[in-house]
Structures are given as C-alpha cells and as structure tokens.
C-alpha cells in the first residue's frame, strides 16, 4: 500500500483533496525540484496570447495536436484558406515558441517552432510559451521529460477528456541549472533537429530520383486538368466502378507513363497477410503493441494514439499476426497507402487495417516501399479506395497496383538513400532522448 501524510497547509488552498493528487511519486518529484532551487515556469516564460483572426482569401499554415510527432516534436502543417479556418485555429505562433498540448498532457504533444513563418497558427488545444530568459531548446526538452509530463498530468481534473490550463503549466516548477548545463541540452536538441532535416532531405532525394527515372520529376507532370473523360463500357465492367472519381484523366496519364516502363503488379512481387481486429474492449494502456493505422507512418511506428494488448492475448495471436523483420506494413483503411519496412524485431500484433507484405521477388523492400509512399502508389490508392465515411483499399485492388521495376543499380541507389534517411531519423531520436535523460536524472535525484 502507498500512502502520503499531508499537512492541512499543504492542501494547495483546499482545491484538491483526492488521493491521486498526493501520490508519493508526485510529492517526491516536487521535493527534488524544491531542493534543486527550481522556480515556477512563469518566472522564465510567458503565454503571448497572439489571437489569430482569419481573413477571407488569406492563406495560413495550421498545426493540429494530432500532427505532432511525440518522440521528436516534429510538426506537420496544413495549408488552409481563411474562409475555411476551423474554429480550433486560434493562436499565432512564431520562431522559438514552444507549444504544449493542454489536452491529455500525458501524451506529451510538445513542439519547438523552428521556422520564421508569417501566418503559422496552432490549435486552441495548445498552450503557447515564449521565453527570453531561458533557451527555447531547453524549455522544449524540459517539457518533454517524464517527471514533468507526470506533474502536468497530475493537474488534470476530467476523466474522459483530461486537460490542464496555461496557468497549470506556468505554475509548474522548472529546474534551470547553470548556463553550461542548459547549453549542453540545447546543443543536443539542435543536433537532433539537424539530423531530422538531413533525414527529410535524403528521403526527398530518393523520391526525386525515382520520379526523374519515370519522367515524373516536374511538378504535377502526371496531372491532367480535363474535366471529363471517355471510358469504354468494357473498362467499367472490368473494375466494377462507374463513378467519375475513379476515371479522372490524371490517373490515366499516370498509368500511361508507368506503362512506358518495365512494371509489375504488386501481387506478383509480394505475398500478403491480413492483420486482425481484436476489438476495443481488449485495448490497454500498456502491454504488447497493437499496430493500428493511426500508429503507423512512413517513418515507422509512432507513439500517436497507441494501444496495447495483454500478454495472454498476444501469445495467442503472435504466431499468425506478429510482423517479421523486413516485412512491409501497409495501411489499407482510413488513410490507405502508408508503407514502412520493419527494421528490427518487435513484440506486437498487426491490426485489421494493416497488411503485412513479404517480398518474394528480387526487388529491394525499401525501393518497393518508396514506390508505394510516392505519388505512384498514392495516386493508385486514391483512385481505388472506396467508402463514404472511412476509406477502404481492398487487398484485391492492392495486388493490382503497378510498380515500376527500374534497373538494379538505380533501385539500389534509391534504397540506399531511403536507408540513410531512416538512419538519420534514428540518430535524431537518440539525441533527443539523450537530452531528455540529462534533465531527468537531475529532476529525479539520480
């Protein structure tokens, strides 16, 4: 049994009386921070409250909580017109701001704004922090450490949609150490971000080389702006589709360019195994990985919205549904067409919305995966996928997508660039973890 003895004067104004709030783990962290001379975050950072007002006809870039990489802090942006601005688009952010999710803080959606953009906007679900007293890289790292995530989660008050306020964050104590210590953390973060940029550049090189070899390197070279197409009845019967979306001229143009190359059907290159749907009632907050569509990206298995299965169920399913090293994981539902080559063994089960592809011909798995992730695979997935609410890409359709078979030396060069990209990303994660651990050891008194 764990217990804490709390003086009445320690009840934080009697605003919280529940035992969860006064767990020994939390009290120990707070004591360590006090002994280190930590100060409230509000002493070194502020919330600038730059309210965003959308203007009709004006473009802006929008960051949503779901678009934050939980391990690296990277963010994806969507380009939106002012008249289409979602209600959640609320705060203007600037270079060196740190944005922190106030919704489910335990998920740790924290990011450092790296670019100097004019109209960059984040969701109302973020708290925006700026500081001129402490390095933004250090503030970003500090907010991503396990002890501080726990102390922020401690302040949540709801059970279904746990959330905190900006004031909760600013009241949380921050250990500053000396400038040399903070500079060491900053250096690791900058090096990590450099590796991430290198990773993106290498992937861009690989994709550009692929498209150049296929004559698709010019921007939207495959697209066709015609608003109609003439289709033979035989073709309609062949694909069992009659909707105009499927027969857009741009798809014909892409396939025509592909047919000028040596191509094979994906089904001739790989064997395909389906995942399994365990049912939401089996989900746990910890255990063995359950690899769903939402937790898979072209860069790997992410921490985003991850679910787990208990060990007993895992043991029952692992023989048939655990992925193997060098298999390609491919999403077929919701966001079809995301592919990733598994680099190392893992203990987990593949969900029903994900397929396992095992290469059975002499083609490089990384090359094949890039083909699927590029416009080549994405256009075919976009054309084929059906469903009015949730998109579904049928295995029979997936088997029939065209894959260009370039000469072996070109395949190898493309695959090597992709591997270098993944190595750079792996290095970036390791550097970020090292930066966090430097801070965590002090906070936890280790």
Image (cartoon, rainbow, N blue to C red):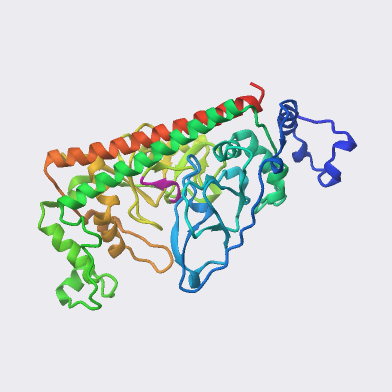
Q: Quadrant of residue 237?
A: bottom left
Inspect this view and state whether residue 104 appears. Answer: yes
Q: Quadrant of the N terminus?
A: top right
Q: In the image, is 83 to the left or to the right of 42?
A: left
Q: Position of residue 259 (x, y in %)?
A: 12, 58
Q: How many marks?
A: 0
Q: Position of residue 301 (x, y in %)?
A: 42, 42
Region rendered in magenta = 294-298
Q: Position of residue 199 (x, y in %)?
A: 35, 40
Q: In the image, is 348 to the left or to the right of 214?
A: right
The answer to whether 286 is drawn above or below residue 93 in the figure is: above
Inspect this view and state whether residue 369 appears. Answer: no
Q: Quadrant of the C terminus?
A: top right
Can residue 255 be found in the magenta stretch?
no
**Closer to the camera, 156 or 437?**
437
Q: Position of residue 385 (x, y in %)?
A: 32, 63
Q: In the image, is 432 to the left or to the right of 370?
A: right
Q: Quadrant of residue 234?
A: bottom left
């Amino acid at each position: 049994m764990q217990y804490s003895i709390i003086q009445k004067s320690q009840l934080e104004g009697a605003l919280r009386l529940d035992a969860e709030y006064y767990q020994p783990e939390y009290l120990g962290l707070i004591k360590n921070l006090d002994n280190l001379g930590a100060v409230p975050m509000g002493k070194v950072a502020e919330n600038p409250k730059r309210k965003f007002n959308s203007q009709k006809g004006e473009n802006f870039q929008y960051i949503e909580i779901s678009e934050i990489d939980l391990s690296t802090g990277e963010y994806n942006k969507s380009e939106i017109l002012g008249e289409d601005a979602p209600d959640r688009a609320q705060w203007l952010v600037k270079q060196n701001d740190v944005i922190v999710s106030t919704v489910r803080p335990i998920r740790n959606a924290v990011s450092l704004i790296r670019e100097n953009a004019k109209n960059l906007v984040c969701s109302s679900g973020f708290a925006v922090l700026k500081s001129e007293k402490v390095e933004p890289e250090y503030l970003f790292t500090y907010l991503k450490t396990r002890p501080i995530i726990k102390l922020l989660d401690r302040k949540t008050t709801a059970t279904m949609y746990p959330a905190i306020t900006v004031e909760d964050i600013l009241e949380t104590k921050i250990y500053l150490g000396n400038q040399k210590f903070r500079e060491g953390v900053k250096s690791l973060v900058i090096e990590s971000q450099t590796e991430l940029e290198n990773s993106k550049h290498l992937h861009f090189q690989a994709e550009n080389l692929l498209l150049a070899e296929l004559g698709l390197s010019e921007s939207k070279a495959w697209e066709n702006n015609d608003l109609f197409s003439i289709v033979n009845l035989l073709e309609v019967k062949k694909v069992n589709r009659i909707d105009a979306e499927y027969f857009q001229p741009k798809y014909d143009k892409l396939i025509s360019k592909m047919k000028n190359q040596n191509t094979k059907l994906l089904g001739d290159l790989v064997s395909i195994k389906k995942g399994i749907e365990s049912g939401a009632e089996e989900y746990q907050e910890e255990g063995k990985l359950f690899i769903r569509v939402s937790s898979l990206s072209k860069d790997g298995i992410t921490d985003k919205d991850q679910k787990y299965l208990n060990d007993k169920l895992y043991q029952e399913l692992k023989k048939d549904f655990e992925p193997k090293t060098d298999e390609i994981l491919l999403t077929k539902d919701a966001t079809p067409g995301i592919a990733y080559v598994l680099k190392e063994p893992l203990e987990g089960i593949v969900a029903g919305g994900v397929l396992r592809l095992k290469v059975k011909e002499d083609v490089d798995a990384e090359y094949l995966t890039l083909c699927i992730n590029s416009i080549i695979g994405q256009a075919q997935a976009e054309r084929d996928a059906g469903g009015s609410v949730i998109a579904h890409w049928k295995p029979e359709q997936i088997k029939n997508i065209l894959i260009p078979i370039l000469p072996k030396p070109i395949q190898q060069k493309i695959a090597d660039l992709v591997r270098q990209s993944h190595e750079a990303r792996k290095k970036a994660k390791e550097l970020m973890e090292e930066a966090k651990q430097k801070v965590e050891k002090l906070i936890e008194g280790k």
